[in-house]
Amino acid sequence: MIFQPKQLGREGLDGGALAADKKSCKRFGPCGVGEKALYLNSFYIDRCFYVTLSSVRRVFKRVAMSKGGFTGKGMFASIPYLVVEYDDGKQKQCNFKREDDVDNLLEYMARVRPDIPRLSAEGERRMAEKAAREAARYLKELTPQAQKAWDELEEAKRKLADDPARAGRLARAARTKRTTDRSNPAYKWVALTIVVLGAAALVYGVWSWVHRDGTGLYFLLFGLAAVFFFSGANVLPTARNNKRAVTREWEAARDSMKEFLGGGKNFPVPYWYAHPVVLDRMIRIVREGRAQTSAEALEVLKKDLQALNSSVQVEQEEYDEVVCIKPIFLLQDYQ
């Protein structure tokens, strides 16, 4: 191991065990989960810190919203973080580019270390309050028709659980296509122009530095900053980051789900809406008595999603659900 991760927390691993554990860890964006430790990033360097799993007290997601996160405008809508709490309340916050990576890491932690809480203390309190509110909202007894719909939706959830990656791909492709469709194409070409100018400045800066020109350092720093910033901001037009490629990925994700469901004829929702969050919200609608069948629950869900916009304030849990599935409904025009 060329660079050994820096230890966080009181407990540590010896060099050999640390090297082997880091090499075999499962990677999620800039972080990783090994058999003995979590590997965490700094702002610039991936997996440069580690915390032994025995030291971890809880691990959870935190989302910082920029102004654009509520208006739907701007380059950055939200900034996801993974927060690891260890020892006696110390915390390490890790920035991620993709919120999906944080969610996937937490899902993996739920499988391999279910004993470690995956919510903050405040989040657990809110979840308990939410569960109490939901319990009060649900009907104590359902009609036979509603009970049948509930059972049908639960069976559909179990079907999707056999291959969760397909639903994740569907939601991710929809979100990417929705963002691409709403973005001004000029932004990508402006970013590309700046990167080209930055690369030219970088080359000139190196040449000036070699020839001991006093301005070379400034051109070098500007070039490096432009190239690294825009290369990591996911705004450059590339073979995968363009409207045609994004549309192909969305269509491929839908076709993949359709194939998985055998055409989707016996599934309670159209195959393009086949996502666990959709089914969870439909189940809640049935249990609240707002629908008696799966078809009715889907129509109520569409109305609920249409009523949610940037002026409506929701809890973090509902926000996570809505941003996950609403792009799918928008792309399908709620059909």
Image: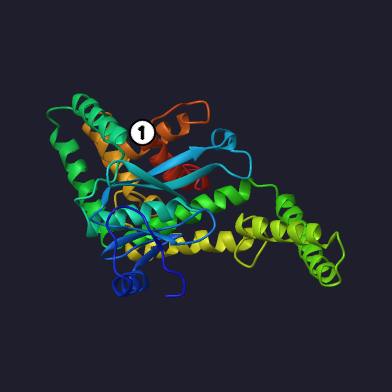
Question: To which quarter of the image does residue 271 belong?
Answer: bottom left
| Residue 142, image x, y percentages | 15, 32
Q: Check the image and tell me how it is coloured.
A: rainbow
Callout 1 secondary element? helix
Q: Can you say whether 312 is above or below 333 in the image?
A: above
Q: Residues within 10 Å of mark 1 (few under 14, many from 20)?
A: some
Q: How many dots with numbers?
A: 1
- 273 lies left or right of 219: left
> Mark 1 belongs to which amino acid?
Val
Q: Which residue corresponds to the image point at 43% horizontal and 53% vertical from the top-left?
A: 100
| Residue 189, image x, y percentages | 75, 56
| Residue 103, image x, y percentages | 37, 51
Depth check: 4 or 203 in front? Answer: 4
Q: Which residue corresponds to the image point at 54% horizontal and 57% vertical from the top-left?
A: 44
| Residue 94, image x, y percentages | 44, 50
**Residue 266 shows up from this direction:** no
- 213 lies left or right of 269: right
Q: What is the quadrant of the N terminus in the image?
A: bottom left
- 75 lies left or right of 122: right
**Residue 215 shows up from this direction:** yes
Question: Which residue has dot 1 on it?
Answer: 300
Question: To which quarter of the image does residue 204 belong?
Answer: bottom right
Q: Which residue corresponds to the image point at 39% horizontal and 56% vertical from the top-left?
A: 168
